[in-house]
Amino acid sequence: MQKIDFIIVGQGLAGSILALDLLKLNKSVLIIDNATLSKSSRVAAGIYNPIVFKRLTQSWMADKTLPVMFDFFKEAEKLFNTKLIYPTKIARVFASGEEEALWKKKAVNELSDFIEAEVHSPSGEYAFLHNNYGFVSQAGYIDVTGFLSHTLSYLEQHKAYLNETFSYEDIAINGYEITYKDYSCSKLIFCEGHLATKNPFFKELKFKPAKGEVLTIYCEELNTTSILNKDFFILPLPEAHHFKVGATYNWDDLTDTISNEAKQTLTDKLNALLPFSYKVINQQAGVRPATIDRRPVMGNHPTHKNMFLFNGFGTKAVMLVPYFSKHFCSFIENKSELFRDIDVKRFYA
Ligand SMILES: Cc1cc2nc3c(=O)[nH]c(=O)nc-3n(C[C@H](O)[C@H](O)[C@H](O)COP(=O)(O)OP(=O)(O)OC[C@H]3O[C@@H](n4cnc5c(N)ncnc54)[C@H](O)[C@@H]3O)c2cc1C
């Protein structure tokens, strides 16, 4: 029997970031993952955006989560000797004169750290737009796929990765020790994304998963260097004239299968905005592990105190996971309590 401090189930963004933080704390870790089961992190655009456009407010805790996100991914860039952070402004195309007026007001008040006060009319690389636009300055994207594959190699080098489907029936709990097949650990942490809905130990959780789809397009005439946002996004990729376009929301079909409806929705939006021809060269789908109150969820099992979950990162995961991984590590080390908003206990009350 091999003894390990932590077994983590799932190598999406949640499991990966948590594993790296625990390894940094000199803990021994084993991640068990079957990457073919759920693709949310692998299809995510990885955009970080401190603004909620619908209400033009700061995104939940962005002032706290953004600095931790930068620190985490800068360290990961050094560890893996690769580029992961792509600072890229977001050009928000205003839907109305009211939105533009509110933007100008908030840019010199509560959102001055995040958005620029100057409003632009269509010109230069944005000459094809019909409406004015403003820039979110502290924005960009993380190369999530690159991060996950570097993390996987790193875990393999440290003999901390097992490629298999975790079977819940193979868990045995003996007081403060949990065994799984040939492994024994003092703490077991579930990070299965939306497949947590199949976890028999955390049945009370209230998830509201949302399928999302994205396209990759090639457009010779589009030369935008910022992420365009209207009621969808067009993200310029490092490869010339390649863009990621997304994303859709579907709460009924919770499969990772791409659909014609999503392709149609996104191409309709593209056709309404772009006067250029383009080619769709890829389409991907994943299911976001969102909760009913749209907050992350973490903590331990009500009876098995050394069994935990770290989940619920349905949106804004690249900003939230690094911050909450540190918060969660401090909790499992008995150094602090969890914030009430994200504690799993809110679903047991
Ligand atoms: C289309 C789309 C676009 C998005 N865009 C953005 C964005 O721009 N910015 C942003 O911040 N967020 C975005 N997100 C959201 C976000 O990235 C994800 O919700 C988040 O990464 C979820 O990570 P996770 O680790 O919790 O889950 P997952 O990525 O689903 O990872 C869970 C892992 O656990 C594995 N697993 C599950 N059960 C088992 C089992 N029994 N045995 C073994 N392995 C198992 C799965 O296969 C998977 O590898 C987007 C999501 C989607 C779908």
Image (tube, rainbow, N blue to C red):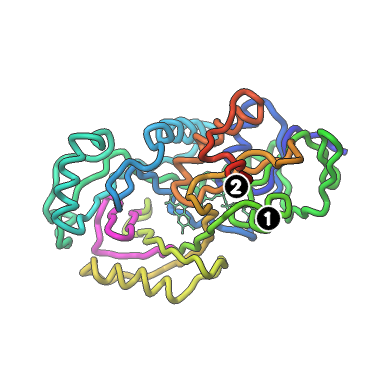
Q: CA distance from mark 1 to mark 2?
A: 28 Å
Residue type marked 1: Asn
In this picture, which residue range is highlighted in magenta? Answer: 214-236
Q: Quadrant of residue 343?
A: top right
Report the side of 332 relative to 181 (left or right).
left
Report the side of 304 relative to 61 (left or right).
right
Report the side of 258 relative to 310 (left or right).
left
Q: Secondary structure at mark 2?
A: helix
Magenta stretch encompasses residue 246:
no
Q: Quadrant of residue 27?
A: top right
Quadrant in which the N terminus is drawn: top right
Residue 332, relative to residue 107: is it above or below?
A: above
Tell me whether the residue at label 1 lies in contact with that at label 2, contact meaning CB atoms closer than 8 angstroms. no
Residue 332 picture location, percent across and down: 66, 30
Residue type marked 2: Phe
Report the side of 218 relative to 25 (left or right).
left
Which residue has dot 1 on it?
34
Q: How many marks?
A: 2
Q: Nearer the viewer, residue 116 or 57?
A: 57
Residue 212 picture location, percent across and down: 47, 62
Q: Quadrant of residue 198?
A: bottom right
Q: Nearer the viewer, residue 193 or 343?
A: 343
Residue 52 picture location, percent across and down: 33, 48
Which residue has dot 2 on it?
347
Residue 281, relative to residue 157: is it above or below?
A: below
Q: Residues within 10 Å of mark 2 (few under 14, many from 20)?
A: few
